[in-house]
Amino acid sequence: MTHRLLGLGLLAVVLALLPLGLPNNFYLDMAILAGLNAIVCVGLNLLVGFAGQVSLGHAGFFGIGAYATAVLVSTHKWPALLALAAGALLSAVIAFAVARPILRLKGHYLAMATLGIGIIISIVLRTETRITGGPDGMIVDPLNVFGFEVYGERVWYWVVAGLLLVTVWLALNLIDSPVGRALRALHGSEVAAETLGVDTARFKAMVFVLSAVFASVAGSLFAHYAGLITPAKADFLKSVELVTMVVFGGMASTFGAVVGAAILTVLPQLLTVFQDYQHMMLGLILMLTMVFMPKGLLPTLAGLVQARTSLGGRR
Amino acid sequence: MSALHRHRTDALPEEPPASAPRAAAPLLRVEGLSREFGGVLAVADLSFTIAAGTVHSIIGPNGAGKTTLFNLITGVYRPSGGRVLFDGRDVTGMAPYRLAALGLSRTFQNLQIFMNMTAVENVMVGRHRHLDTRLLPALLRLPSLVRRDHAAADRAAELMRAVGLERYVGTDAASMPYGALKRLEIARALAAEPKLLLLDEPAAGLNATEKKEIGAVIRRIADTGITVVLVEHDMKMVMGLSDHILALNYGRKLAEGRPEEVARDPDVVAAYLGSHG
Ligand SMILES: Nc1ncnc2c1ncn2[C@@H]1O[C@H](COP(=O)(O)OP(=O)(O)OP(=O)(O)O)[C@@H](O)[C@H]1O
Ligand SMILES: [Mg+2]
């Protein structure tokens, strides 16, 4: 328990000190984008890492949040927070509607079904030109909260950092609760979980909806921050990118998801090779992680540290 | 032992003397139950009852349909025909999690441990239906939820002690030895506070000492008033623990009765000699 808060505290310190080490807005921008991806990944990790259910469609929910904000705020002049909430609600409703039928599927079938959901969402965004602006996307108004306008990388950084901390706190709480144990149990053995009284269909739907809401909220914020949203942010490759971040950072590790999102957001921006061959690189990282580091980066490093200290103790 | 007692005494009715008629209200009644796999009947028109407060063993050679019967009773499989009545209710085809809520709990022949959790967390999943399982209180870690969770952790540790696993409480299940995992499944099933506990080969793969210990654990569970259904190939354990034995072969009832009767039954002897010879 104290261990939990220790991790959260450490993350808070890192996030508080990070701006001091970042020389200019270019790096702050990267940190903000990494933070938004991390929010999605912490939620996605609850579904993929903890509950063991694949999703190759989560960029779709990111897109729903982003476009809900773009349409409701820029076109219909709704207050930003109301639009964000509406996007989250829409994502939740869609996720809930598809959860029962698709989460009954397993393995490849589930992957295909979620892939399909993501593709449908991105096609709708691309083709409903009158509302969404089609492939060119939409310009989005800045974030305005109760008359206070969020502008500039510095302010945005603190907003995203704060929200990331809250997200991580919520995820840690959940994992260490009866709901979290039910999710991990249905991952470990679905039949055992069922016979112990866990309504596995209900909990799968619950975590699917929750992770969709996290993605949607991050999407809404991204739309405001970037000022422009295109359907590419909701497409299949973005979904694969998100899953890669989770797998690379460490499945069933909340801090791993944060680290994975951070590294895989920053790398492409620093390495031009990565940028030019981004999709190939993502595939390569996914493959190499699966083969050489199936637990992901953070759990593997933690394992190494533990092994070293216990060796040292014996000597 | 004390843990097991403490936890059931409140729910313990006055035990009838062993000779009293028990026919009144069986805890479990199976009527004409069948299950077919690709044209083959794994369980065939099977009927029997299990009286509350007894240890009831189900024996039979490999492939006799014992595990399939457990899967039918606990809702993991749907029957092709017949009915299951638990505690006076028709529960045929009911989902496993609903049956669990009615007081049915089981272990598995092939371990179904949550290897991604610690030992005590495994047992705490057994407390699931007694805990607050709503999303919002969990996300916000409401104090009321935390309080009940702590109590559940204490209770789980107590049950682990009761089955002799006290030194594994915080251990990752994945790093525990096989024999300990067999007991962990029993502790986890007990955490649900079942009326009826189904144990599928709890002693399989254990050495002689471990078998004796498991036998003692089952004895203590039965003494707390939980009705036990035991599937086990170890005949010494079966004979030592059972009030009643049902012998199956090819999904059908071969014999039924008190342990001495069933052991002497020529059909049972033949089936066992046939399967081992
Ligand atoms: N899911 C399934 N699909 C197809 N056939 C099955 C399935 N489950 C069980 N069977 C078949 O049903 C029959 C009974 O199997 P079951 O596992 O119930 O036997 P058992 O009495 O538990 O045997 P053992 O003592 O070896 O555990 C076997 O012929 C088995 O092959
Ligand atoms: Mg079996």
Image (cartoon, coloured by chain):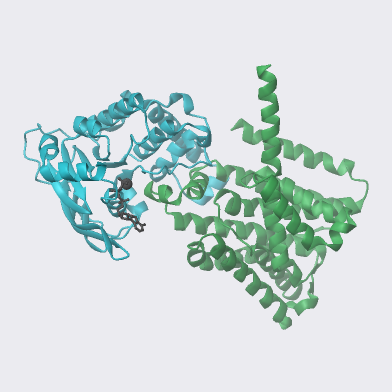
Residue drawn 60% across the image and 71% down it: A116
- Tell me if residue A73 comes above or below residue A246 in the rendering: below
Residue A145 position within the rendered picture, expressed as x and y whole percent measured from the top left: 75, 59
**Viewer-closest of A205 and A243:** A243
Q: Is residue A273 visible?
A: yes
Quadrant of the rendered image containing residue A84: bottom right
**Viewer-closest of B258 and A41:** B258
Residue found farthest to the bottom? A130
Q: Specify the quadrant that holds the N terminus of chain A.
A: top right
Q: Specify the quadrant that holds the C terminus of chain A.
A: top right
- Tell me if residue A312 comes above or below residue A6 in the rendering: above
Residue drawn 40% across the image and 41% down it: B126
Residue A77 position within the rendered picture, expressed as x and y whole percent measured from the top left: 73, 72
- Left or right of A206 in this view: A4: right
* Chain A as rendered: colour: green
**Viewer-closest of B115 and B187:** B115
Chain letter for the part of the structure drawn in cyan: B
Residue B270 position within the rendered picture, expressed as x and y whole percent measured from the top left: 16, 44
Q: Is residue A159 visible?
A: no
Residue found farthest to the right? A23
- Left or right of A249 in this view: B112: left
Residue found farthest to the top? A315
**Viewer-closest of A52 and A232:** A52
What is the tally of numbered marks visible in this picture?
0
